[in-house]
Image (tube, rainbow, N blue to C red):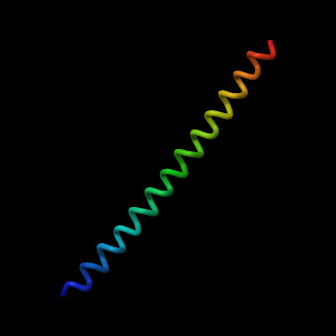
């Protein structure tokens, strides 16, 4: 009786963790692109 419940909990936990890591990587990617864009803008201003 208890075994399937534990299995379900582990599966949902695994799914949540993969979703969280996917979100984290997406956030990091967006941060990286934002910083790169900002750096380009700053470089343009410094060149002028």
Q: Residue furthest top?
A: 48
- Which quadrant would the N terminus be assigned to in this image? bottom left
Number of numbered discs: 0
Which residue occupies 68% across, 34% down?
A: 36
Name the side, left or right, on which 23 lies relative to 45. Answer: left
Q: Position of residue 35 (x, y in %)?
A: 63, 33
Name the side, left or right, on which 40 lies relative to 32. Answer: right
Q: Residue furthest front?
A: 46
Q: Work out whether 46 lies above or below 33.
A: above
Which residue occupies 29% across, 73% down?
A: 9
Tell me where residue 13 sits by quadrant: bottom left
Q: Position of residue 26 (x, y in %)?
A: 54, 49
Name the side, left or right, on which 24 lies relative to 16. Answer: right
Which residue occupies 62% across, 40% down?
A: 32
- Which quadrant would the C terminus be assigned to in this image? top right
Q: Position of residue 14 (x, y in %)?
A: 40, 69
Q: Position of residue 42 (x, y in %)?
A: 70, 21
């Amino acid at each position: 009786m208890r075994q399937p419940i534990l299995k379900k909990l582990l599966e949902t936990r695994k799914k949540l963790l993969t979703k969280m890591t996917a979100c984290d990587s997406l956030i990091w990617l967006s941060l990286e692109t934002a910083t790169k864009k900002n750096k380009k803008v700053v470089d343009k201003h410094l060149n002028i």
